[in-house]
Image (spheres, rainbow, N blue to C red):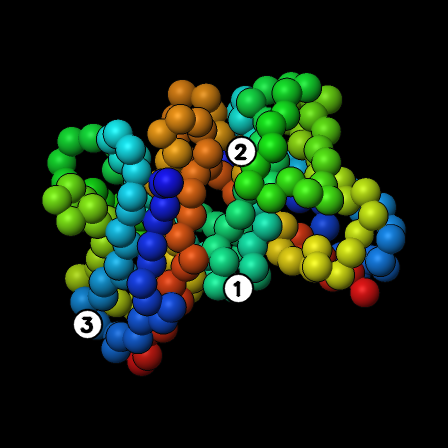
Amino acid sequence: AQSVAQPEDQVNVAEGNPLTVKCTYSVSGNPYLFWYVQYPNRGLQFLLKYITGDNLVKGSYGFEAEFNKSQTSFHLKKPSALVSDSALYFCAVRDSSSYKLIFGSGTRLLVRP
Amino acid sequence: DVKVTQSSRYLVKRTGEKVFLECVQDMDHENMFWYRQDPGLGLRLIYFSYDVKMKEKGDIPEGYSVSREKKERFSLILESASTNQTSMYLCASRHRDTYEQYFGPGTRLTVT
């Protein structure tokens, strides 16, 4: 079965430090991977995607993600965290047999001043 | 700019009521989706629609139905609301040639 795992419920980081939010996936065929962010009482906003090509993908708000096929991972990263990055982050993978996205359970990022 | 709107941000209904949640997108997208979001469970797909008048069950369709009479509008219907349907409901749309989905702001439904 296809699935996405976000092993950390919460990640805490100090402002200015690098951050990583982890995601691993299980999918048949080539993975199409996504990151979304959700601010309080808002819908999800698309951050970035990996379809093919360079393993390092750059997205909105200075975020990037690294695709690692051997480790079946797609970790979200940012070199220097901002307090305003505090939000709920979702990793998703496209179901290879349909248009559906399969979402992870989400990771809450808390950036302290 | 991409825009998906939902008819209500907050909704309170009584058990047994029929509930309509409306979603409208202005991007001429073919595909539309309804999810519910619950803490610790992420987003779970209720129903989706490939195009007008087409619908397909997602992972948790029980207790829900949908309607898509026009391309821009996708409605979620709770035939007889129950307390276990208290949740955040998110609508999304997608162009058939791309992969990312665009989300509305969500409707927080409370069933008492």
Left or right, residue A13 beside residue A98:
left
Q: Quadrant of residue A86?
A: bottom left
Kind of element beneath mark 2: strand
Task: Check the picture and name the quadrant holding the C terminus of chain A.
Answer: bottom left
Q: How many marks?
A: 3
Does mark 2 fall on the same chain as mark 3?
no
Q: Which mark is residue B39?
A: 1
Kind of element beneath mark 3: loop
Which residue bears the numbered disc 3?
Answer: A17
- Residue B100 x %, y %: 40, 35
- Residue B15 x %, y %: 84, 58
| For the residues bearing labels 1 and 2, Cβ distance under 8 angstroms | no
Q: Is residue B104 visible?
A: no
Left or right, residue A86 beside residue A72:
right
Residue found at x 13% / y 36%: A54
What is the crowding at mark 3: few (fewer than 14 residues within 10 Å), some, or many (at least 20)? few
Q: Quadrant of residue B23?
A: top right
Judging from the image, mark 2 belongs to the subunit labelled B
What is the crowding at mark 2: few (fewer than 14 residues within 10 Å), some, or many (at least 20)? many
| Distance CA(mark 3)–CA(mark 1) | 27 Å
Left or right, residue A98 beside residue B23:
left
| For the residues bearing labels 3 and 1, Cβ distance under 8 angstroms | no
Kind of element beneath mark 1: loop
Residue found at x 44% / y 27%: A98
Q: Earlier in the sequence, mark 1 or mark 2?
A: 1
Left or right, residue A13 beside residue B109:
left
Judging from the image, mark 3 belongs to the subunit labelled A
Judging from the image, mark 1 belongs to the subunit labelled B
Seen in the picture, residue A113 relative to B85 is either above or below; the reply is: below
Which residue bears the numbered disc 2?
Answer: B93
